[in-house]
Amino acid sequence: LSATPEIPKEDGRPKWDNKFQYILSCIGFAVGLGNVWRFPYLCQIHGGGAFLIPYFIALLFEGIPLLHLELALGQYLRKGSIRAWNTISPYLGGVGVGSWMVSVLVSLYYNTVLTWVMWYFINSFQEPLPWSVCPLNENRTGFNEECYESTAVNYFWYRKTLNITPDIAESGTLQWWLILCLAACWAVVYLCTIRGIETTGKAIYVTAIFPYLVLTIFLIQGLTLPGATEGLIYLFTPNLNTLKNPRVWLDAATQIFFSLSLAFGGLIAFASYNPKKNDCEKDAVTVAIVNSMTSVYASIPVFSVLGFKATTAYWDCLDRNIINIINEFDLPEESIMRQNYTSWISFLNSSYPEKIAGLKLKSCNLQEYLDQSVSGTGLAFIVFTQAIILMPGSQAWAILFFIMLFSLGLSSMFGNIEGVFTPLLELQIIPKSAPKELLSGVICLISFLIALCFTLGSGSYWIDIFDRYAGSVPLLVIAFFEVIGVVYIYKIKRFSKDVEWMTGRKLNLYWQITWRFISPLLLLIVFMAFVTLQMQKPPSYTAWNPKYEGFPMKEEKVYPPWVQAICVLLAALPCVCVPLVALFHLVKQKRRSKDPSLVPPEVFSCQGANS
Amino acid sequence: YAWDANEEYLFKAMVAFAMRRYSSRSTTQISNVLLCNVTDRVSFWFVVTDSSKNVTTVPGSEVEAAIRMNRNRINNAFLLSDKTLQFLKITSTLSPPVEPSTPAWLIVFGVVLCLVVAGIVFLIVSGIQKHKKKNKESTERENLEEKVEVTLENGMPCEALDLKAGHINGVFAADDERFTSL
């Protein structure tokens, strides 16, 4: 039945205005904040250019096959994730429910990260930038103590933005400025997703293309900064020894997986709005390669700027030492320059060792500054903002940078919201006569109210938890069941025929091998390794505590038991949907078979391909 | 600029000026300011003598206070700042940052929010208008179709068929049984 070409019916399902919109939406969903602040960090700690090897191997054997699977599935079945998996088999309905749940959880906290970006953005319109100066203390004799001990940038992030509490158990109060920004962010999301893909399709032209423009601008600017070359050399020098560490391969696999936004249901939703006869194979390869290229492309300006920052810090260190020496020995100004610093130091050390020792000079090492690697919010809000202060015309750079981050996050949010919106629309929880705008409004409103928890003092600790537990393990489980479900329950032969009908050419052996064996195996290995690594030590977090002795270092704390229970719940809830729904259907089946009044159905293999 | 005797002269003049302004001792002359131990680093000691009482120096605290009061003028005379012209033992008072009446970020936030809300309202209103137009069109079309013909089904007008009296085919009825069971 699936092989016969169907007359395309007008089923009233919305569709993309053109193919480019669809591709751009998938790319925008895949390319997110992680491409900018996680990939360069991984490159840095895992041996620079050498990391690209496990990264591309993972892309080839895990990323592209899974992506093709999801896109083909969505395109053929023309349904959102819940309905699609119900169609494949009622026992696999749990996979759809699970991915819907993950989309909900991730949407909640992801938009709060965008709130922080927006807060920084609207604060970039001031002169001087608020994170460049420390505020004064009460009697105006010196700077605020917390700010003075750490840096102005740290102070602005931890105190002025988050108003963070020293412990996750202390919730603190709701921060009104964050609530305002959160409301604005959800309003922007509502504006863009108000009618589903009709509106996101228009918005994606801006939010998906703009980051590339800004990255190019930063690339050009970054390369002209002093010290950029040191940063780039440091980033890209391959250290092949790191490949012996299995941790590197695990990180590469997880990075590819999460970077492509697989198993969220959003990709299935996007593909379901496609015409059936569409080359999903080419689309999948295109999206995956563009995503990886963007990661590599983004790491160049990031590392130019980091190299610049490290060099400036190194020069500051040298300058401080030089001033101290000149003051001590009463030498004329500009007698010691950075270039002849080392020769001077050795000369003075040999002639006046006690004096030099008495000065307590800090040893300045450029490598040490380059080694300070940060990822995630630390990279964007602490390290990068510090580098921006040092650039001429900081306001413009700050504004550009934060708009870019906002666009990157927003285009990913579209995919997340679509993964929530499309299944709900198909389940028809609101009557058909009600407009779509109502459903998207309700989704945005409820999400806003729940996300208010993240604006508490302890909010950022909770976001870390959501990111680590809700946005990681469940996705691996769901993707595993996706592959197994399609290959072994829906049967790979049937699926191959469906894909051949859609793309118009025979399925390559590469897809057969990866779908049948390599991808499920890889997912299983990654899942086991991931869980094992998490279990090795009790889950802990680092807290910002001004009263800590080691301040400004962050204090390492263990999660209290009730928080650990929540972590387990977050990770387990979407996963447990899969067996639960299967069990529910099994019970229903058993009850149905015990009921003699119903005639047992004939063997009726209907593909359910009609939407 | 190079530090030479002229700069030293200017420095003496500035210190004398500061002393005159602070304690209104109009008798302080440039010759009252003495520099010593000038090094290549351009660092030196200086004292201010009191010409009224012979060979005594003005107490350090007074000099310190005078310089603190006129620090800005002294800095500007040499085109230097608090950091580049250091008086040991005289700490600079920090100027408070300028606080505008409304925080700048609130203004930008207001602009952003207004734009977004305007966009949402526009989209909702246009959606409602489109919906109304579609409803009007569909009711017009329905009225048109009713006049064309009575829909027929197997030679019988549909209204005549009592749909409830039909027999429900068990094979097709159960929705979930559409697919082969596992």
Image (cartoon, coloured by chain):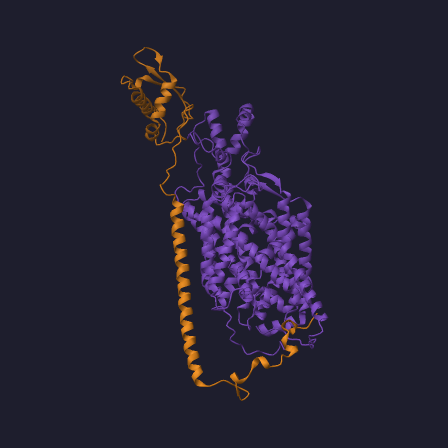
Chain colours: A purple, B orange
- Residue at image position (48%, 31%) is A322
Residue B129: quarter of image: bottom left
Where is residue A99 shown, x and y percent of the image?
Answer: 60, 60
Q: Is residue A438 above or below residue A305?
A: below
Left or right: where A212 falls relative to A490: left
- Residue at image position (52%, 74%) is A11
Image quadrant containing the C terminus of chain A: bottom right
Taking the view exactly as shown, the residue that stands out farthest to the left is B26
Where is residue B140 shown, x and y percent of the image?
Answer: 41, 77
Image quadrant containing the N terminus of chain A: bottom right
Q: Closer to the camera, A176 or A349?
A: A176
Q: Closer to the camera, A96 or A543?
A: A96
Q: Closer to the camera, A28 or A311?
A: A28
Left or right: where A41 falls relative to A187: right
Is residue B133 among what the camera can see?
Answer: yes
Q: Is residue A194 above or below residue A172?
A: below
Is residue A228 among what the camera can see?
Answer: no
- Residue at image position (53%, 52%) is A450
Taking the view exactly as shown, the residue that stands out farthest to the bottom is B155
